[in-house]
Amino acid sequence: MHNTAPHHCKTVSEQKWSLSTFMEFYERVLGPRLFKPYGELLVREIRKDIRPDAPPTSILEVACGTGRITTHLYEDLARPLDLRLVATDLSKIAIDMAKKVVSEELRRDVTFHSDVDMADMPFADNSFDIIVCGFGLMFPPDKARVAREFKRVLRPGGKIYGTVFHYNELFDLARRQSQKHFGTPSAIMDAALSLTDPSAITRAFSLEGLCRGVSEVATSCPLSFHLDDPDTREFLFNACILLEEFNQCDTLTREGYLDTMLREFHEQVPTRDYQVKAWLLRGQVDQACKESVAPSPRPDFSALSAFRQLAPALVENPADRPLPLAEAQLLRPYHAMKAAFLAEHPAYPEAEVEALRGTEFSRLDALQEAYLDHVGGTLAPESLLAQDYQVLKSTILGNPHTGSKSSDAAFEKARAEIYRFFRCAPEEYEIIFTPNASGAIRLVAESFPFESGSEVLLTKDNHTSVHGLREYAKSKGASVKYVPLDKDLLILDSSMRRSLEKLDPRHPHLLAYPAQSNATGARHDLKWIPLAQEKGAMVLCDAAALVPQSRLDCSVHHPDFIAISFYKMFGHPTGAGCLLARRSSLRKLTPPSFAGGAVCYYSGPWSPTDRLLHRDDGKRFEVGTPNYASFHAIAQGFEFLSRLGLDELRARSTALARWLETRLLELRHDIKAQTPLCRIYGPPPEHKGATVMLNFFDCYNAVFPHALVKRTAESFGITVRNGCFCNLGAVQQATYTTAGAEHCELDKTEKILDCKTFDDKILNKGNCGAIRVSFGLGSNFRDAYRFYLFARCLLNTEGARLADTLADAPVN
């Protein structure tokens, strides 16, 4: 049976949190105080509605948790009335806990299922007479799909009973305390209180015809419960543990936070008696409701396909010849939207953009492609490719270690262009060529003088290659601290300041963060560079996503290390990047090994002395022969950007991104949930680059799997990026709809043993991840419009219908 005995950890913060420990707390502390009384309420309501002439034969409980309500359903309904009872939950850990705490008789008579999503249940149509959901409907984002699924599995005459929080004083206080102390509310509490206004679920019931014959769909039912200080303390621990800042505190600091919050709880609720109100929800299925089920239509991509086939000259200059009616109708909205775009952005250089497209990126139109992954890698201008080919064909480039004059000259020219672009002096900064930005980051990571007492400060929004440097730090005894993000996915100011204040000046520290997010396009404040340096930390700035369209001015900002990939800036050459390092900081780094070009002398058993002589400054970090065939192209790439004008490139690219973002946010489904088609993640436009990170949601408000969206877009010649973009931190925070969802997903698949399992069972299903659209060199309004047209085709349909359409589509 359920254990209600107190169980207090001597020091709450010494607990190692997991979904299992949370479920144990949930069962022991919240179970008897919240879920038991509301379980009794649900049973009473069901009993009142049972008709002797038409008794139910089966009950399905969804989101059963640890079995508190299951116990009441079994003891008061299923056993005495001889009903079949099935209990399900998304979490296997919750089901395992339920099986441990319920009676042996209940375990024998009740069927338990884990991994059951209430929006997609593994039961046949017309399987149950009653569905019960106690405090679970707050969590699924696709409530209209849940309502449809309830209707599907219920028989005609079937009934729905549920509870959600209208008000919970304990939860609300915890939410406000986490906001006050950590700058962000507890997402668990936010999710639990997300239906204080029940209209989202009652409207979903109404859309599916589940409210017919129900006098009152939502009724408020109050209670109060007492929670003593040890249990309140443990509750606060569980509410805060998924907040990065609290999670990373040592035990003493955590206990200090809990002491403070508990005192503030006492001031608010001196009696320790917390008020709760829950909505009692009702629904029922009649025969007419069952017969109203109709699939949503398949998406119609005919307009997108037809627009793709039109020649750019015809699209831009339709007056040059008479057009058939179908083509004229197709182009009319395009020209109306383009006119509005040019009116909104009068400085947009339309003629220059089209001229650049025609001379440098004509292959896009020749292949009918819209390339929208410039953050992943921009396209190389045709003149740059031609110039580089001519240089390689007409110049003798030898190994620099041999003393090739041509290679040395190309090397110096590339260096000069880099110094000019970043406005830094050779006396202050050294340039070390690497394969890419990741190679530059790794160079710093493996050479940095980490030691016990050192700290690595990493922002949650960081490329995987930056996160990876923590392994080098930990191997040398350093600690790793993550700085969280605010609701706009910008660095949380208060947390960063507290982290910098705590740095011990006796040890070397490193702050590593991106100037611009490679996921959301968020432009992070460069003020952290001098502030961190004032506190004794060196700063590694990942500039790979920023510098393709913005300058990092080292005459103003002086990061210790800057990581760059050239292919992101001008497309060619690939496999080339650099580390721009302040000489004073570079001298503090020690290469972990040596290779050709890095040393002039090393001894061995053939020598009586043990000597190793590194070359000066950056040369000691060389790993063999540099990619000397790339030096000319690097210099030419910077010259190309200079001629084009970086400010102009940024202005035109961001204008396209902002137009697309605005138009996408206007799109709403007309049927079912009538919700917005898109969710766009990240800060307001003024704090972003030319990037739009988004997900599409179908007419039931369920996410279209981003892998499916990408494949569909590709079939119509539109290139976008999907997934987590090598930035799990920012993407997870943006796209997981409830706190702990990641843990539930990992629990749902038990253990993620390999990357294929993670990709197939979590990432590609859309449970985490997004679509990224990014503009850059060669982008024009047609590209933005084609993606907008693609998005419109997803209105008023659902994921399964999109999958059917893609399966039947001809290979592109």
Image: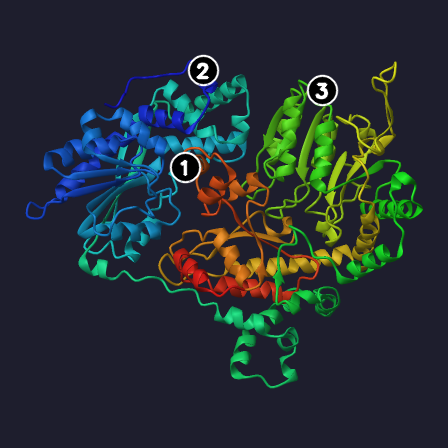
> Viewer-nearest of labels 3 and 2?
3
12 lies left or right of 418 = left
Residue closer to the observer: 614 or 460: 614
Give residue 85's position: percent from left, percent from top: 20, 38
Closer to the chain start, of discs 2 and 1, is: 2
Residue 507 is labelled as 3
> Viewer-nearest of labels 1 and 3?
1
Give residue 136's position: percent from left, percent from top: 33, 40
Residue closer to the observer: 527 or 293: 293
130 lies left or right of 809 = left
- Label 1 to label 3: alpha-carbon separation: 42 Å
Give residue 727's position: percent from left, percent from top: 59, 41
Quadrant for the C terminus, please. bottom right
Residue ID for mark 1: 749
Hey, which quadrant is residue 93 in on the image? top left
Q: Amino acid at mark 3?
A: His
Residue extending furthest toward the left:
53
596 lies left or right of 734 = right
Please report the residue visible at 21 percent of the width from the left and 31 percent of the height from the top.
71
Local SS, label 2 = loop
Local SS, label 3 = loop
Q: How many marks?
A: 3
Closer to the chain start, of discs 1 and 3, is: 3
Local SS, label 1 = loop
Q: Residues within 10 Å of mark 1 (few under 14, many from 20)?
A: some
Please report the residue visible at 13 percent of the width from the left and 33 percent of the height from the top.
79
- Label 2 to label 1: alpha-carbon separation: 32 Å
Give residue 445's position: percent from left, percent from top: 70, 30
